[in-house]
Each structure stands twice: as C-alpha cells, then as structure tokens.
C-alpha cells in the first residue's frame, strides 16, 4: 500500500528522496543528511519520536514499545489476540497472511522491562519460529494538545493519530494527511492560517481517537493483574470487548419505544 501511494504521489508531481533523513527544522530551513532544503510549509509524518515536532517545540505523543516479525507457515483465517502479563498493558497478536503471519506484541506506556524477552516468550508459547524482529514505539494515549506550530503540521504517528485500544492508525493518518495537504495548499494560495488544520482534522477524526483514549484509561485499571483482567473480560463479554477494541461505545443506547 505504501508503495502504491508513493507511486501515485510521484505521478502527481511529488519528488521522493530515499535514504534522506531530516535532522533539524528551523523556520523554512530543513536540514537533512543530504543537504538543506527550503520549505514554506513542513508536514512532519516522521513517527512518534518526530524530529519535526522536536525542532519546532511540539510535544511527542505518549508512546509504548512494540515488536513484530514474520513467521512462515499456514495459519487460520482469523486474527488471534492475547492479553495479560504476556504483554503488560497491551496485547500480543498473530495476523495471518498468505503462507505466513505477522506475529508481535505491544505493551503500555508504563513498561520498562525487556521487550525482546517478552517477544521470545510469546513465540515459544505458540511454537512459532519467526524471522528477525523489528521494534519501535506506538502512540497509546491519543494526540498531544497541539499538532500545528509556526509553519509545521504533524500527521499520523507523529501526531498520535492511533486508536488507543488497538494500535491501528493507517485510516486516520490518511484522512489527516489529505487534510494537511489541502490546508497547506489553502495557506499558500490564499493565506489560510495553518491553524485551520488543527480544527479540520479534529472535527473529522478527533471523536473516535478521544473515545479510544477513554476506553484505554478504563482498561488500564485492569491490565496490571491477569486476575482482574480476566474478571473484567467476563463481565464485559465478547461483544463489548470487540467494540472496545474498535474504539466503539461499550453501551449502546436503548431502542426507542414504538407507540
């Protein structure tokens, strides 16, 4: 998908520079390992430890470590998720693909242990033999207070645009990315303030992100103990658990009476 989007961007006139890392942003100057470039508008989509955010003084989103790898073999058609001390405050997963599966785990923002040890224990418990694992950070508590400052806007993981209950964020990031692009164009063409981006993206996708954070804060009260977590899952039930993972309301409004 990433390659397809990149190809479409090139077709529309974008220039892609590979193996180029931004090291600092100062005003309209963007310093990289391949020289300095000028940018009237800078859009930082460079992950939860965003160089753009740090350069302009915007907060990083609260994040937690995660790790995954690919395991060859034949798997079921359904995604398996595992909760508890196996992945404190988060979950482990097996996501089937064609003749392989993505296996991994993510924890919560309070984890300070050895993630590799947790990962190794998980794959051993499932009799998996994955390839080399890669790790990183995933935003887990929603967006920071601001995602715009001066001539910079943040998008995707850099802006904490990740569903707090499941770690997913591609769809939200694509929506916000389009809004950022349109706002940048409006700014350059007719002087629209870049602060409009803040209002626009929050109106479009801010609601589900906030709902996910509320659910996660509630869930965090139980994640410290397998016993409490198991009891909570029994009380919530399978259907509400599925809704929680999708950042949907746990309780549906009662049906209106027909008179």
Image (cartoon, helix red, strand yellow):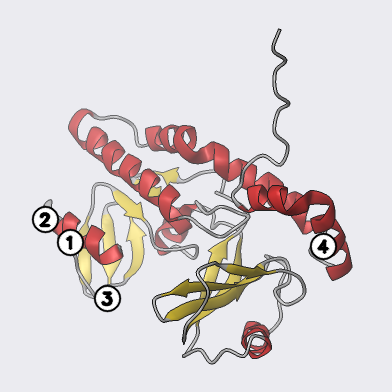
Separation of marks 2 and 4 at Cα, in angstroms: 50 Å
Separation of marks 3 and 4 at Cα, in angstroms: 47 Å
For the residue labelled by badge 1, is the local secondary structure a helix, a strand or a loop? helix
Q: Nearer the viewer, residue 51 or 256?
A: 256
Separation of marks 2 and 3 at Cα, in angstroms: 26 Å
Between label 2 and label 4, give the one nearer the viewer.
4
User: Which mark sits nearer the N-terminus, 3 or 4?
Assistant: 3
Side of 194 where 107 appears, left or right: right
Q: Which residue is mark 1?
A: 7
For the residue labelled by badge 3, is the local secondary structure a helix, a strand or a loop? loop
Q: Which mark is residue 33?
A: 3
* Residue that lies at the very extreme toward the top in this rendered image: 259
Separation of marks 1 and 4 at Cα, in angstroms: 45 Å
Between label 2 and label 3, give the one nearer the viewer.
2
User: Which mark sits nearer the N-terminus, 1 or 4?
Assistant: 1
Separation of marks 1 and 3 at Cα, in angstroms: 24 Å
């Amino acid at each position: 998908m990433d390659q397809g989007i990149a190809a479409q961007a090139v077709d529309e006139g974008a220039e892609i520079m590979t193996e180029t890392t931004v090291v600092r942003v100062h005003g309209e100057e963007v310093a990289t390992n391949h020289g300095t470039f000028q940018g009237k508008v800078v859009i930082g989509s460079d992950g939860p430890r965003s160089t753009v955010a740090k350069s302009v003084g915007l907060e990083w989103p609260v994040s937690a470590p995660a790790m995954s790898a690919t395991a060859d073999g034949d798997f079921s058609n359904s995604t398996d998720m595992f909760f508890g001390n196996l992945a404190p405050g988060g979950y482990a997963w097996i996501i089937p693909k064609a003749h392989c599966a993505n296996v991994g785990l993510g924890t919560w923002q309070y984890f300070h242990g050895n993630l590799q040890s947790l990962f190794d224990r998980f794959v051993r418990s499932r009799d998996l033999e994955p390839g080399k694992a890669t790790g990183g950070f995933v935003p887990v508590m929603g967006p920071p207070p601001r995602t715009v400052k001066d001539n910079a806007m943040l998008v995707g993981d850099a802006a904490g645009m990740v569903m707090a209950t499941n770690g997913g964020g591609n769809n939200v990031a694509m929506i916000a990315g389009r809004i950022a692009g349109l706002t940048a164009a409006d700014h350059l063409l007719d002087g629209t303030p870049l602060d409009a981006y803040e209002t626009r993206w929050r109106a479009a996708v801010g609601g589900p992100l906030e709902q996910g954070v509320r659910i996660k804060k509630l869930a965090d009260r139980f994640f410290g103990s397998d016993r409490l977590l198991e009891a909570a899952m029994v009380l919530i039930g399978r259907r509400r658990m599925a809704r929680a993972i999708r950042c949907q309301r746990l309780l549906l409004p009662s049906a209106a009476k027909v008179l």
